[in-house]
Image: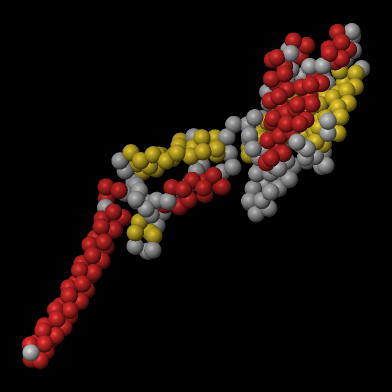
Amino acid sequence: MSETWRKDKAYKSQLGARRKKLDIVIAILLVVFAGVVIEFLFRAPRFDVRNIEIEGVSGLVLDNISGNYLWIFPRANRIHIDEETLVSEIKRENPSIESIEIIYEGHTMRVIAKKKIGIFTWCETDCYYVDQRGEVFERAPSGIQSLIRLIGPIYEPNKSSGFPKPITWRYFEQNEFEGLKLMIEGVLELGKRLPLFGGLSVINVLADKNGGVELTTSAGWIIRYNVQGEATTSLRNLIINLESDDLKYQLENGKKLEYIDLRFGNKVYTKYK
């Protein structure tokens, strides 16, 4: 019985050694297979990007997909191209671009860039377009009158941007600028709703370093408020004031509105001429 036990143990030991060798062989085969797949995907000619078409913006250079990755795999391969990083770098280097779409058609990669739309202008010596987030992004034609003009200080949020002043500079912080837009949109809506203020709009915005803002309306009177306050509260107080019977009475009896001051919480000051 002892001899049988020894033979069985030797057999199991040999079997275990064979399994280990088999596992090693399988692992080597899997590595080789993975290498072949990777080589096929990253170097297969049918995935090569041979042509690049750029639409929507001129002078765009895509250095990001030239050369090789890890000195082996070509970057110009649609399987390997990191589109998210590519789009991020293009937008960072081109402040006038709003969005980018990448489309592959055979061996051609189409990069479709959509430029920002200026909804304001900021003017000092020259005028520049300002986007919906309050960022200066491109020089505007001199004397442009079709957009709301922003007047006052701007600041540089990213001192290492490398762009000349004022490109990428901002007019207020993001949340403050959103409040400013809310006020302007509210004035436009009131102009549509109230017969006394038909067609009312904002023509320029004057800001100071302390967050004080004056909105000059198309009717000539001014709205004063502070961007550091709650924009919804300021707008609500403006609406209550413009819809009041007292203001309507004053205007119908020959008074002219000079300004409405919303800088003091729920206390609203109205001055007539």
Whether residue 78 is visible here, answered yes or no, is yes
Question: In the image, is residue 26 above or below residue 156?
Answer: below
Question: In the image, is residue 34 above or below residue 134?
Answer: below
User: Where does residue 132 sit, x and y in percent of width and height?
Assistant: 63, 34
| Lateral position of residue 90 relative to residue 245, left or right | left
User: Where does residue 254 sit, x and y in percent of width and height?
Assistant: 89, 9
Using the rendered view, name the quadrant where residue 192 is placed.
Answer: top right
Which residue lies most toward the bottom here? Answer: 2
Give the colour scheme of this rendering: secondary structure
| Lateral position of residue 54 relative to residue 244, left or right | left
| Lateral position of residue 130 relative to residue 217, left or right | left
User: Where does residue 216 sit, x and y in percent of width and height?
Assistant: 79, 25
| Lateral position of residue 64 relative to residue 194, left or right | left
User: Where does residue 200 sit, x and y in percent of width and height?
Assistant: 74, 17
Task: Please tell me which residue is depicted at 69% across the width and 31% down the height of the picture.
Answer: 181
Task: Please tell me which residue is depicted at 49% across the width and 46% down the height of the picture.
Answer: 87
Task: Please tell me which residue is depicted at 54% across the width and 35% down the height of the picture.
Answer: 115
